[in-house]
C-alpha cells in the first residue's frame, strides 16, 4: 500500500531505529533498545508508529537470483499518450517486470525486468513488448551488477530532528 506523505516529525531515535530495521527486519524492539541504549518500551512504540505511518514496511524481498533470474534488464519505453493507461495495465500484469516508473520526459516509462539469460530478455522485448500497440522501445540495457537496490536505501540522517 502506497501512502502519501507530508513531512513527518521524525528524530534521531527514529533514524537509528530505521537503520537497525533496514539492516535486519527481524530484529526485536528489545534488541534495538540494547543496541541504542534506549528504553525498550519507547523503541517498541516508535517502531509501531513507523510501521503504522508506512515509513517502514514489512515486505519480503525476493532474491531473483535464487530462482535463476540473474539478468536485470532496464528498458526505456515511449508510449502513445492516448493508450498510456491501457499500456501501463498490461505492463503491470507482465511477470518479468519488477519495476515500472513514469519518467519526467512526457510519455516515457522506465521498467526493470528479470530474466534467466540475455536470450530470454531479447525474446521478451521483441515478442511481448513489441506486440503492444502504441509502445515503442527506446533503449534496453542489461545491468551487469546491481550494487545498491531500493531495499538498501535509507534517508539522509540530516533530515531527522535532534
Image (cartoon, helix red, strand yellow):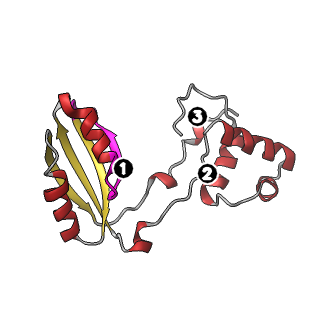
Residue 77 lies in what quarter of the image?
top left
- The residues tagged by marks 2 and 3 sit, at their Cα atoms, a distance apart of 23 Å
**Element under label 2?**
loop
- Horizontally, is 143 left or right of 138 in the view? right
Residue at position x 14%, y 38% in the image: 134
Residue at position x 17%, y 39% in the image: 78
* Above or below, comparing residue 73 to residue 43 in the picture: below
Q: Residue furthest top?
A: 6
- Horizontally, is 139 left or right of 116 in the view? left
Q: Which residues are magenta?
A: 92-107
- The residues tagged by marks 2 and 1 sit, at their Cα atoms, a distance apart of 18 Å
Q: Residue 62, position in %: x, y?
A: 48, 63
Could you say which disc has been placed on residue 67 in the image? none
Quick one: label 2 or label 3, which is nearer the N terminus? 2
**Element under label 3?**
helix
The residue pinned by badge 2 equals 58
The residue pinned by badge 3 equals 159
The residue pinned by badge 1 equals 99
**Is residue 95 located in the magenta-colored stretch of the structure?**
yes
Quick one: label 2 or label 1, which is nearer the N terminus? 2
**Is residue 159 located in the magenta-colored stretch of the structure?**
no
Residue 21 lies in what quarter of the image?
bottom right
Is 71 in front, or is 43?
A: 71
Q: Residue 37, position in %: x, y?
A: 82, 52
**Element under label 1?**
strand
Residue at position x 34%, y 46% in the image: 92
Q: Disc 2 vs disc 3: which is toward the camera?
A: 2
Is 81 in front, or is 74?
A: 81
* Above or below, comparing residue 26 to residue 18 in the picture: below
Amino acid at each position: 500500500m502506497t501512502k502519501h506523505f507530508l513531512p513527518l516529525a521524525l528524530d534521531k531515535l527514529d533514524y537509528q531505529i530505521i537503520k537497525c530495521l533496514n539492516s535486519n527486519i527481524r530484529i526485536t524492539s528489545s534488541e534495538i533498545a540494547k543496541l541504542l541504549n534506549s528504553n525498550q518500551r519507547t523503541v517498541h512504540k516508535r517502531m509501531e508508529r513507523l510501521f503504522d505511518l508506512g515509513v517502514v514496511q514489512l515486505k519480503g524481498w525476493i532474491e531473483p537470483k535464487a530462482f535463476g533470474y540473474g539478468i536485470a534488464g532496464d528498458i526505456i519505453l515511449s508510449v502513445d499518450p492516448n493508450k498510456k493507461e491501457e499500456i501501463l495495465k498490461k505492463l503491470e500484469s507482465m511477470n518479468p517486470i519488477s519495476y515500472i516508473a513514469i519518467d519526467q520526459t512526457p510519455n516515457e516509462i522506465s521498467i526493470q525486468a528479470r530474466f534467466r539469460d540475455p536470450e530470454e530478455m531479447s525474446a521478451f522485448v521483441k515478442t511481448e513488448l513489441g506486440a503492444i500497440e502504441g509502445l515503442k522501445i527506446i533503449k534496453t540495457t542489461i545491468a551487469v551488477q546491481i550494487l545498491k537496490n531500493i531495499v538498501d536505501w535509507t534517508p539522509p540522517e540530516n533530515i531527522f530532528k535532534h
